[in-house]
Amino acid sequence: MANIKSAKKRILVAEARNARNKAIKSKVKTAIKKVDAAVAAQDKEAAKAALLAATSELDKAASKGVYHKNTASRKISRLSKAVNGIA
């Protein structure tokens, strides 16, 4: 365990950030799963609605630094391609 005051603070701050990042990543994963499920069910309307929500979550995660902007962009692109591929 840390003895120095600044080291103790860093531990607390790291735990808080870790919890926040974990929650944001979980939201993103859930949103992506909803898009994938709608695509698998061939439900175009549900897929479009889920894609809109997933895009929003990914953009928020990228703006907060949880995901790199290129990673978020790649994920959005792949989801969009899947949704647009529904006949």
Image (cartoon, rainbow, N blue to C red):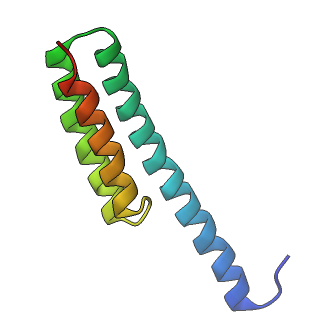
Q: Is 48 placed above or below 17 here?
A: above
Residue 30: x %, y % from top left = 41, 32
The image quadrant that residue 9 belongs to is bottom right
Camera-side residue of 25 and 38: 38
Q: Residue at x 20, y 18 (%)?
A: 46
Residue 64: x %, y % from top left = 36, 65
Q: Quadrant of the C terminus?
A: top left
**6 with respect to 78 (left or right):** right
Q: Residue at x 31, y 8 (%)?
A: 41
Q: Is 87 placed above or below 23 here?
A: above
Q: Is 84 placed above or below 86 here?
A: below
Q: Residue furthest top?
A: 41
Residue 84: x %, y % from top left = 18, 26
**5 with respect to 52 (left or right):** right
Camera-side residue of 77 and 19: 77
Q: Residue at x 44, y 60 (%)?
A: 66
Q: Quadrant of the N terminus?
A: bottom right
Residue 62: x %, y % from top left = 34, 60
Q: Is 9 placed above or below 69 here?
A: below
